């Protein structure tokens, strides 16, 4: 079929219109249905300044004598620390607990809705004793993650030790955070930081992430300088759990580091309280929907082109 100049001009203009409509339709679709909000309700990490839901927060604190400055800083800034936790909680009242450790583990307050008692216990902390270094940071974290009860038990190396108090209340938050604060290596129940003690710190971070519900760990390293033997297991612990690591020299800004960690740890990838896997079928459907928007527009215009061309050709003949 031969088209005169006017017909060819009409077709060229219409094809250009097809292209513009295709691009415009795709852009409109992308604006109205951003990634992660389409079919399948695919969960994406929330921003740190967003509310994460119900917050469970447990402080696991080295209360040996060398922690004097750090504990004093935490106590002086406790309202700001709690405000940071409350800012992520949907009802503005995070549930909290407190565990302390030296070469043994003490559950001072289980996770509880009676927050005043926990806050009072933190405010009443005193740094004292401790003896030879290191301390039982890994075993204290073991207590928190695995809801361990009181009594004697052996550490990862088989050394006997003891836990005072029961940490039995189940983790139940939409976001669950442990803040571990210490100034020395993980050492189990004895005064030796073995390779197994250090590895346990990293492994417990992995266990925290796999916990149901998941637990994220913020490790606060209080020291004169960052020594690799202390820092590296803490970094591995935080990284493996999806948490954060922070360093504070001598502990003078411990509260600032804690607040940065609480606010900075991202909300877990949950929707409606449940972890959602990526739904490949949903992705396929969403892709088809995206394509359908501009394809339908293009087909409609192409149909108009064909009709217009036929009409012009008929008139020419």
Image (cartoon, helix red, strand yellow):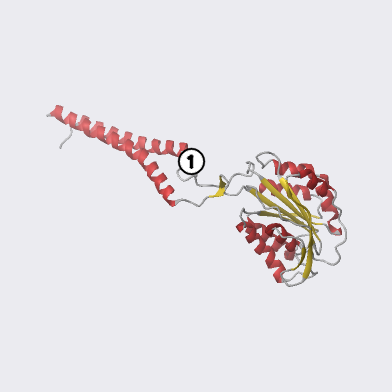
Rendering coords of residue 14 (x, y %): 29, 33
What residue sits right under mark 1 in the picture? 34
> For the point 45% across and 39% down, which residue is it?
30
> For the point 56% across and 49% down, which residue is it?
274
Asked whether, in this view, residue 144 is left or right of residue 74, the answer is left
Rendering coords of residue 229 (x, y %): 73, 66
| Towards the viewer: 262 or 303 | 262
Asked whether, in this view, residue 283 is left or right of residue 64, the answer is left
Q: Secondary structure at mark 1?
A: loop
Q: How many marks?
A: 1
| Towards the viewer: 234 or 189 | 189
Rendering coords of residue 31 (x, y %): 47, 37
Residue furthest left as drawn:
317
Residue furthest top as drawn:
315
Asked whether, in this view, residue 135 is left or right of residue 46, the answer is right
> For the point 88% across and 61% down, which residue is it?
129
Q: Report crowding for label 1: few under 14, some 14 to 19, many 20 or more residues within 10 A (C-alpha).
A: few
Rendering coords of residue 120 (x, y %): 82, 46
């Amino acid at each position: 079929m031969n088209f005169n100049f006017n017909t060819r001009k009409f077709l060229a203009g219409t094809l250009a219109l097809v292209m513009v409509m295709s691009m415009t339709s795709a852009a409109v679709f992308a604006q109205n249905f951003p990634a992660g909000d389409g079919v399948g309700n695919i969960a994406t990490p929330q921003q740190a300044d967003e509310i994460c839901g119900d917050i469970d927060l447990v402080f696991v604190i080295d209360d040996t004598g060398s922690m004097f400055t750090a504990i004093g800083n935490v106590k002086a800034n406790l309202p700001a620390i709690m405000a940071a936790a409350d800012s992520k909680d949907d009802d503005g009242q995070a549930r909290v607990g407190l565990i302390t450790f030296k070469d043994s583990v003490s559950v001072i307050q289980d996770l509880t809705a009676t927050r005043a008692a926990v806050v009072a216990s933190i405010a009443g902390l005193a740094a004292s004793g401790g003896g030879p270094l290191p301390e039982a940071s890994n075993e204290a974290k073991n207590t928190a993650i695995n809801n361990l009860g009181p009594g004697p038990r052996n550490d990862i190396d088989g050394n006997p030790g003891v836990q005072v108090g029961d940490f039995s209340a189940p983790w139940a938050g939409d976001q669950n955070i442990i803040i571990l604060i210490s100034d020395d290596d993980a050492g189990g129940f004895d005064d030796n930081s073995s390779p197994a003690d250090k590895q346990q710190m990293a492994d417990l971070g992995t266990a925290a992430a796999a916990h149901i519900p998941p637990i994220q760990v913020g490790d606060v390293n209080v020291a004169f300088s960052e020594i690799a033997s202390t820092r590296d297991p803490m970094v591995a612990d935080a990284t493996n759990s999806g948490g954060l690591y922070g360093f504070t020299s001598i502990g003078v800004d411990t509260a600032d580091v804690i607040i940065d960690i609480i606010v900075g740890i991202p909300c877990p990838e949950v929707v409606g309280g449940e972890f959602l896997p990526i739904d490949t079928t949903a992705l396929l459907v969403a892709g088809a929907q995206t394509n359908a928007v501009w394809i339908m527009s293009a087909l409609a215009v192409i149909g108009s082109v064909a009709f217009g061309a036929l009409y012009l050709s008929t008139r020419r003949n």
